[in-house]
Image (cartoon, rainbow, N blue to C red):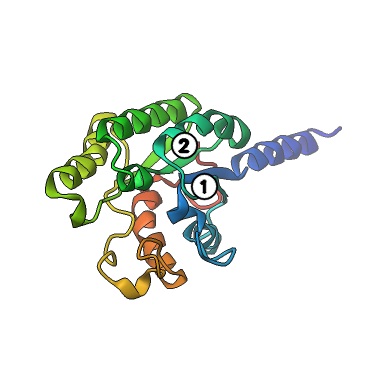
Amino acid sequence: MPLRFIATFVFMFFFAATVQAATILVWGDSLSAGYGLERGQEWPALLQTRLAEKGFNHQVANGSVSGETSSGGRSRLPAALAEHAPNILILELGANDGLRGLQPQVLEDNLRAMITEAREAGARVLLVGMQMPPNYGPFYTRRFAAVYQNLAKKEDVPFVPFLMDGFADRPELFLADGIHPTAEAQTLILDTVWAGLQPMLSSPHAKAR
């Protein structure tokens, strides 16, 4: 085989490896699973579209489960990491812990464990924070929000302070239950997450690891 054909083959092999799609795993609860929405309206689906539009060769896997707590997410994560081998993990859990009044320390321990497991599996982590409504009392709401802030600092991970930033006080952007965002709110959520995610992405068409 002529040398130039060998060189071309080697180049194409390494180019194919370079553009291999990276995986972003969204690990959340009903706020990311698209509770009450039609399939494809949830913000992780919109994220896939935005990545493609901007030329990023990434695939989004949505492992979010409605009703999930941080404990449940922690127990399921090892299998998901093995299955998807994500380059980036978007960690959005804790709302159900807060709504059930669970101890913030349990939430912190679970989130820290998931960050550690993801890193050991070769993934970078984007931590997405949650806040509790004022009726839970100032002491609990402050402790709850501080869990995410402290973890982001101690673990040195990119951080989105509040998933529903900018519209949490707009009832028209929530379903009748007053908890789950409408389809119209999903783009707002995506914009919030995108601000934290975009700096973590490699150049368009490049592998993320």
Q: CA distance from mark 1 to mark 2?
A: 9 Å
Q: Residue at x 43, y 28 (%)?
A: 119
Classify 204 as above or below 81. below
- Total marks drawn? 2
Left or right: residue 124 versus residue 166 is right
Where is residue 10? Give x, y as percent.
Answer: 71, 34
- Horizontal relation, residue 30 to residue 134: left or right: right
Q: Residue furthest bottom?
A: 172
Between disc 1 and disc 2, whose residue precedes?
Answer: 1
Residue situated in front as seen by the camera: 206 or 49? 49
In this view, 200 is above or below 55: above
| Image-based side of 59 in relation to 99, left or right | right
Residue type (three-letter) at the residue carrying disc 1? Val
| Three-letter code, disc 2 | Gly
Identify the residue at image location x=79%, y=38%: 5
Q: Quadrant of residue 13?
A: top right
Residue 209, given in percent of the width and then of the height, sits at: 50, 36
* Tag shown at residue 76: none
Nearest the eye: 106 or 48: 106
Residue to which mark 2 is pinned: 73
Q: Residues within 10 Å of mark 1 (few under 14, many from 20)?
A: some
**Percent from the top left, x then y, of residue 47?**
49, 58
Report the residue that reaches farthest toward the top: 120
Q: Secondary structure at mark 2?
A: helix
Kindly identify which residue carries mark 1: 65
Q: Residue at x 53, y 28 (%)?
A: 78
Instruction: Work out which quarter of the rendered image holds the N terminus and state it.
Output: top right
Which secondary structure, mark 1?
Answer: loop
Residue 197 in picture, x, y percent from top left: 39, 50
Q: Quadrant of residue 104?
A: top left
Viewer-proximal residue among 50 and 90: 90
